[in-house]
Amino acid sequence: MLRLGGAALAVLVAVPLILAPAYRFIDPVSVPMLERYLTGRPVVRQWRPIDDISDRLKAAVILSEDGLFCRHLGVDVSALRAEVDNFLAGKPARGASTLSMQVARNLFLWNDPDPVRKVLEIPLALYLDLVLPKKRIMEIYLNIAEWGPEGQFGVAAGAERAFGREPQNLDWRTATLLAAALPNPMLRQPGKPSRGMVRIAGIVQQRAQQFGERAACVGEGGQLAL
């Protein structure tokens, strides 16, 4: 049993160690996508290079999901420390996942809330930031994030389903509504937004327009055209 456990652990460690550097050149498939393929459910995903995706969407996603993305090394230490303090105090979790941690989870782990999964996300996210440029991590995120209840993955599928648009042709309204859908794409429908979702999108737009330079690391030539 110990040998089997050790072998399983070695495989779990080896897979991301080998695949993560390869994802600099290979467009990956996420665990949720694989799960749908294996269970015969549809998967809709058309990969888009990051420079073919609206700068407004990039800024909106970063300012709503991970405002320090361009500055941290994969993990937001202060947010994570606050999350640990809340957990130890028995308070509700607020979430401290960076975009790198979300990419690590979607590529190598499982989606159910689990303290063990959260612990595993941290070294994986640090490793992703070590071996991949920020721009590539963001490109992967925007192409594997679940963006609809019917197997839509990536912004191309999400923008097409919601607005019938290509991801480079997004104005502020469509970009921020797509960003606002990310925390719960099964329920939040950017094409038919609720009042609450419209309100959240407005807040995201204000942040992105005011602090858009914080997302410059994912722009073409280090700049965003907002």
Image (spheres, rainbow, N blue to C red):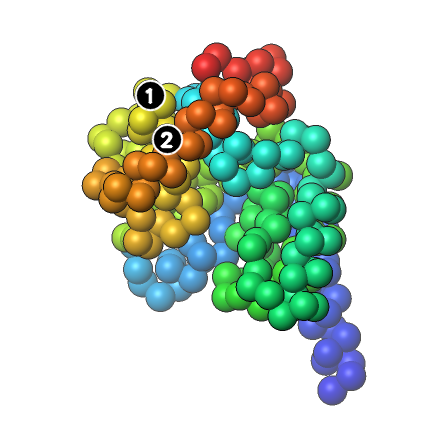
Residue occupied by mark 2: 202
Say which of marks 1 and 2 sits in front: 2
* Residue name at image x 43 percent, y 49 percent: 183
Relative image position of residue 163 (x, y in whole percent): 24, 32
Q: Nearer the viewer, residue 144 or 181?
A: 181
> Horizontal and vertical percent for residue 170?
33, 23
* Residue 140 image offset from top left, x and y in percent: 53, 38
Above or below 169: residue 34: below
Say few, some or many: other residues with alpha carbon within 10 Å of mark 2 (under 14 / 14 to 19 / 20 or more). some
Residue type pointed to by label 1: Asp
Q: Disc 2 residue type? A: Gly
Residue 171 vertical position relative to residue 122 in the rendered view, above or below: above
Which sits in the foreground, 95 or 58?
A: 95
User: Horizontal and vertical percent for residue 138?
Assistant: 55, 34
> Which residue shows up at 77% across the image and 75% down it?
6
Q: Which of the 4 image quadrants contains residue 20? A: top right
Q: Quadrant of residue 9?
A: bottom right
Q: Which residue is mark 1?
A: 171
The CA span between labels 1 and 2 is 13 Å
Judged left or right of residue 1, residue 98 is left
Tell me the number on the disc at residue 46: none
Lateral position of residue 92 relative to residue 84, left or right: left
Question: Camera-side residue: 116 or 135?
Answer: 116
Q: Quadrant of the N terminus?
A: bottom right
